[in-house]
Structures are given as C-alpha cells and as structure tokens.
Image (spheres, rainbow, N blue to C red):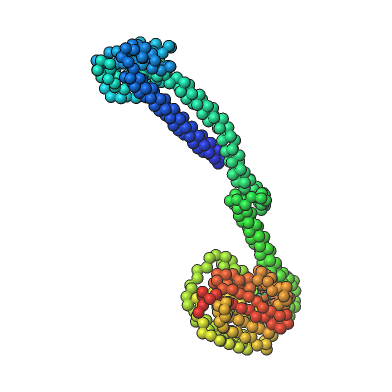
C-alpha cells in the first residue's frame, strides 16, 4: 500500500473510531441521566400518593383517591401481600398495562425501568399501611415515551453528525497525506531522473516552510551538491593526472622515434635520448607514486596513535634532512612537548613542508625549524627564506595539482600534490596546517596540535 493511502486510512479510521466512541458515551450518559431523573420524579409522585392516601379521610372512596394520584400516562395500583390488587387506576390510553402486566407484591421499596410493548416505563413500589391496617404495596408505573422519543432523536442526530463529520475527516486526511508525500514523491522522481539521465539534479523546495520535510529535501540537495562537486573533482583529478603523464610520455615517444629513425646513424643522439627517456621515466614513477599515496589516503587510515616526544622526533628528522640535502637548517626548541599522534603520519606531514622549504628556496638560504607552545597548542614551524607564495595563491596551493609557477615546479620535480596530501594527513591526525608567506621573502608553514592532543 502506498504511503499516502496508509496515512489516509490510518488517520480516517482513527478519527472515526474516536468520533464513534465520543458519541456513544454522550448518548449513554445522557440517556442514563434522563431515565434516572424520570425515575426520581416517579418516586416523588409515589411518595406523594402514599402521603395523600394516608392523610385523607377514610370516608373518601379508594377509587377516587387512586384516580386523583394516577400519573398522566401510567397506572397506580395498591397490591396486597397475597399478590392481588386492592385497587387500580389507569390513565386513558394505558389500559394495556392493567391487562398485560403481571401483578407482584414487593415487601421493600423498589424502583426500576421496565419495558412494555417496546416502551420504557418507570416502575416504583413503596410499602404502606392500608386503611384496614395491612401492609400493602403502592405501585406506580409511568410511561417514559417522551424521554424515549427524545433519546431516539438524539441517537439519530449523533449518527448523522458522525456521518457528516467523516467527510471533513476524509478530506483533511487526504490533504495531510498529500502534503506529507508530495516532497517524498518529488524526491523519488528526482532520484529516478538522476539515475536515468546520469545528471545531478536538485529538488525544488518550498521557500516558506522549514519543517522536517524541508530539511530532508535540503539534506538531499546538499548531498547531491557534494556528490556533484566530488564527481567534478574526480574528473578534474583524472584529467590533471593524464595531462601530467602526457608530457613525459610525449618526450619519451619523440626521443624513441628519433632513436628509431636516426639512432644507428648518429650515435651522439643516443646518449641524449637515453638521458631524456630515463629522467622522464623517473618523473613518471614519482608521479604514480604520489598518486598511489593519495589514492590510498582515500581509505580510512589505520592510525597508531601514541604519545610522541615532539622535540626529539623533529630534531631527528631535521638532522637526517640536513644530511640528505646538505642544507643549513636551524633547529630552535622553546619547550619540551609531548603530543598524541601517529609517528609515521606526522613525519610524512613534516617532510612535505621541509621538502617544499628546500625546493622553493636557494641552497644557500637557511631554513629554520621551531618547536614551541602557544595558546592554540603545540606548534611546529618550518620557515624558509625563498621565493614565497603570492597572497592570492595561499589557499589554492592546497588543491590537487595546483602549482604557483608551473615551469619552476617542473624544474623542482613538483606535481602540486604535496600540500593536498598534507591537508589530508592533517585532517586524519586532527592537526591544523597553515601557510604564511610574503612573496620574495619566504614562507612559514605551521603545524598546530590542539591543546587536547599536546602537553
Ligand atoms: P609541489 O610538489 O609542486 O611542490 P605542493 O602541493 O607541495 O606541490 O605545493 C603546491 C605549490 O605551492 C608549489 O608548486 C609551489 O608553487 C607552492 N609552494 C609550496 N610550498 C612553498 C614554499 N615553501 N615556498 C614557495 N612556494 C611554495
């Protein structure tokens, strides 16, 4: 069953059941109230008759007395203890009461509702002392036809009201179900559309409402936006990677064909070609290695997080870097710091910044590495006095394949992947990375461990 029909059915059935229960309870309480008050009235009439009969002079004939107290629509009867009537008076139109109702003597006071010919009657029996000194029962039977008619009318009105009330219930539940399912239906249609057309689409959302359905649609749109951005990034990444591979491949291809055509005749070409092919192959290998690293980073990394002596680790890395590249590096440490992190990932991150500081500064320019504490937490700074980064490129350098000066980066062997990898490592480690730079003067790269991860 469709969601819309379910909502429609459940709300309608619920409302109708409630309505029926309410109306039934109204009817029963009202009828009980009416019949009780009728019964009380009959009891009062019976007591009045008992008083009257006992007070009136014995010379007044019993028949006349009974006639005086007989109810308008009923019967007044004196019943002896042997069950025989000592006197009966019936109002006109109620003769059948005398003929059909069995006569019973009741010792105690009795009040009840009885039914005769489908009409309710109030029956009251009160014991009294007769003129002869015997205990007899004065019995009043009074028709409740008018009350019965009223209750019948009430029943019909309540039934009509229930049936009429079903119409707005059905209409409102239809509107409600439509209101709820419309955005869902439109979402399903959009999803189908996306699946069939292969294009990312957004659900049109109502401007005013900010309810849960709006939030659901909004979340869906955000998700689609994110998917679209990622999809485009992915496409961009593949096209950038192929572009990067195309250059060395073109160089290799042209040198190979040169060798094929003239390699045998001109041996001097041989060395140059092999050299070029070799260096381009190395460049391609570097690129594929970096691409592999990035691809592996897409998975959730398995981190081996533990307490690290930051000063010692940075100092060791600085020393080995110094040896490998023969660069002058100052190591400044202001505080002894322990951080909680993964050793290999931190080293990888630190190395990216060290490598950039080396690549984008001259070999005689000094690099400074500083380990210190601040309000924001522990900081590792790599300061170079190289070419710097223009202000407008400071944010973009973290994008994959972004290089400020492509020609220069190519010389340094960069592909524009280092900082994007650094950003991913930093996110996984929960540290902040930031670049501050003045073009022509140098760059400071900062790795900040939050206070919760350092002491
Ligand atoms: P690459 O492998 O090209 O160095 P990165 O992602 O590490 O890639 O850096 C992106 C770009 O940012 C570099 O091409 C360079 O132009 C610029 N850059 C990064 N670090 C520095 C730095 N310390 N000094 C000057 N420019 C830098």
Q: Residue at x 67, y 80 (%)?
A: 443
Residue 224 drawn at (x, y percent): 63, 55
In terms of image quarters, where does ligand 1 lie? bottom right
Residue 100 drawn at (x, y percent): 35, 12
Can you see residue 367? Answer: yes
Residue 79 drawn at (x, y percent): 29, 16
Which of 51/343 is in front? 51
Which of 13/62 is in front? 62
Q: Quadrant of residue 54?
A: top left
The relative height of residue 174 versus residue 215 in the rendered view (above or below) is: above
Q: Residue at x 55, y 32 (%)?
A: 166
The relative height of residue 326 versus residue 27 in the rendered view (above or below) is: below
Q: Quadrant of residue 167?
A: top right
Residue 421 drawn at (x, y percent): 61, 71
Which of 188/197 is in front? 188
Q: Quadrant of residue 372?
A: bottom right
The relative height of residue 203 versus residue 245 in the rendered view (above or below) is: above
Q: Residue at x 45, y 33 (%)?
A: 25
Q: Residue at x 55, y 75 (%)?
A: 450
The relative height of residue 20 versus residue 451 in the rendered view (above or below) is: above
């Amino acid at each position: 069953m469709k969601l819309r029909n379910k909502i429609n059915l459940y709300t309608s059935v619920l409302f109708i059941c409630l309505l029926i229960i309410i109306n039934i309870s109204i009817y029963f309480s009202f009828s009980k109230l009416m019949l009780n008050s009728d019964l009380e009235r009959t009891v009062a009439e019976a007591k009045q008759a008992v008083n009257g009969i006992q007070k009136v002079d014995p010379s007044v004939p019993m028949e006349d007395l009974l006639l005086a107290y007989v109810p308008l629509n009923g019967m007044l009867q004196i019943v002896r203890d042997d069950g025989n009537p000592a006197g009966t008076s019936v109002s006109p139109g109620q003769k059948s009461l005398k003929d059909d109702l069995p006569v019973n003597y009741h010792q105690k006071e009795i009040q009840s509702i009885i039914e005769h010919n489908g009409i309710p009657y109030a029956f009251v029996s009160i014991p009294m002392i007769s003129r002869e000194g015997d205990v007899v029962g004065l019995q009043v039977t009074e028709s409740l036809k008018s009350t019965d008619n009223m209750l019948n009318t009430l029943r019909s009105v309540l039934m009509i009201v229930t049936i009429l009330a079903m119409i707005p219930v059905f209409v409102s539940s239809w509107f409600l179900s439509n209101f709820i399912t419309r955005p869902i239906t439109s979402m399903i249609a959009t999803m189908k559309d996306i699946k069939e057309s292969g294009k990312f689409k957004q659900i049109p959302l109502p401007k005013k409402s900010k309810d849960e359905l709006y939030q659901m649609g909004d979340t869906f749109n955000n998700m689609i936006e994110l998917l679209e951005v990622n999809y485009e990034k992915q496409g961009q990444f593949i096209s950038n990677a192929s572009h990067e591979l195309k250059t060395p491949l073109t160089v290799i291809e042209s040198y190979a064909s040169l060798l094929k055509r003239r390699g045998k005749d001109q041996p001097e070409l041989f060395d140059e070609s092999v050299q070029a092919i070799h260096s381009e192959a190395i460049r391609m290998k570097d690129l594929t290695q970096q691409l592999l690293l990035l691809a592996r980073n897409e998975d959730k990394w398995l981190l081996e997080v533990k307490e690290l002596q930051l000063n010692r680790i940075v100092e060791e890395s600085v020393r080995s870097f110094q040896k490998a590249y023969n660069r002058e590096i100052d190591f400044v440490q202001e505080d002894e710091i322990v951080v909680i992190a993964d050793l290999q990932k931190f080293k990888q991150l630190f190395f990216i910044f060290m490598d950039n500081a080396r690549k984008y500064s001259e070999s005689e320019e000094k690099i400074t590495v500083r380990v210190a504490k601040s309000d924001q937490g522990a900081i590792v700074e790599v300061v170079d006095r190289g070419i710097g980064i223009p202000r407008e490129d400071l944010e973009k350098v973290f994008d994959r394949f972004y290089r400020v000066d492509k020609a220069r980066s190519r010389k340094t062997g960069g592909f524009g992947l280092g900082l994007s990898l650094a950003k991913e490592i930093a996110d996984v480690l929960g540290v902040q990375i930031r670049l501050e730079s003045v073009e022509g003067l140098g760059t400071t790269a900062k790795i900040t461990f939050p206070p919760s991860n350092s002491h």
